[in-house]
Image: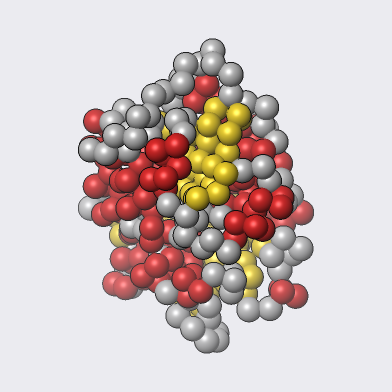
Amino acid sequence: MKDYGYQSKKCDDMGLNVCVIGAGNMGKTHIEMYSKSSDIDFIGVVDTDESLKSLINKKFDVAFESELSKLLFSKNIDLVSVCTPTYTHFSIISELIDARIKNILVEKPLTLNLSEAKKLEQPIKTGDIRLMVAMVERFNNCYINVKEKIEKNKIGKIKSISTNRFSLFPFYSRWYIYKEKSGGPILDLGIHDIDLLRWLLSDEVREVYSSSKNYHGHQNIGKTYDVNLTFNSGIKAACQLGYFLRKKNVSQENFKTDLNIVETNRRLYVDTSSYPRYPDAYFKEIKYFIECVLTNSKPSIGFYEAVADLKIIDAAKKSLVLGKPINIAD
């Protein structure tokens, strides 16, 4: 085990020392949100692309390093955000656990696949790690309002739910093109709605059936995917998702999303594209994890929540290959 001299900060100490790994699109968002928090004393940023240093330093008061070990040696870090490409998550989280970092916030998904996630279970237990996966839609006001309506029985008996999530393809990051690095749209986009539906319904999925349609181009860009879920309660959910090639097909935030709940006698439709996640939902998400650290609390979106999402993703991909429904318990 590498010893970087890490010592956990007491809750009554002033301010936390934060490290953000990855200074790309999501990394910049995390840096900005931490910069707005009065509970943060120090922000360190780690990225192998040193050309980003001047850009980041112009906007934020941070310490920039190209190697994680240098930052961990120079500062007692209380909290780390992992904002790197999906295929790097497993190795980076493993390194952080090895370095005795106790508080880890990782951008969704937890890992590239279920197999990698399972390998982290014992190290996280043994290391007593507080880990949260950044599922930002749980902090989006429009979905919070829907959940409150469900919990207060303001919505009738739910028969089915459908979601649509289409995004402008992120051409700024070439790794998204390759399924072996991004996990493909079912993982990268689908995990949002799979996690969201589990949270909204407080229910678990028992069966998954997936299909896809080709309409143009590359393996990741030229398909729409339908992921159909059956919950333990019997509620049916249909998630449609994919990448757009042209900006005219999506909203100002480069996303087109909606939620449609079919009740016994009526429908509840929410055009969620009109509720941008940036900046409010991201700030609430970061603030929530900071509060978990300061109050020594367990995050609601922890390791096992992330694994439950990845089990469904794994089943959706199997269904796509086999052309038949997959039982989650199998």
Where residue 42 sits in the image (x, y, percent)?
58, 34
Q: Residue at x 67, y 32 (%)?
A: 37
> In the image, is residue 50 above or below residue 38?
below
Residue 136 sits above or below residue 226 on the image: above
**Residue in the foreground of this view, choosing between 77 and 231:** 77
Query: Residue at left 67%, top 38%?
Result: 35
| Coloration mode | secondary structure
- 65 on left or right of 314: right
Q: Is residue 305 visible?
A: no
Residue 42 visible in the current orientation: yes
| Nearest to the observer: residue 99 or residue 182 | 99
Viewer-closest of 238 and 233: 238
The residue closer to the viewer here, 185 or 18, is: 18
Residue at (43, 66) in percent of width and height: 182
Which residue is at a point 24% across and 30% down the rendered structure image? 126
Q: Residue furthest top?
A: 12
Quadrant, the N terminus: top left
Residue 270: x and y in percent read 71, 51
User: In which quadrant of the rendered view does residue 251 lie?
Assistant: bottom right
Residue 111 position in % (x across, y down): 37, 53
Question: How far across and how far down the image is residue 256, in percent?
Answer: 68, 63
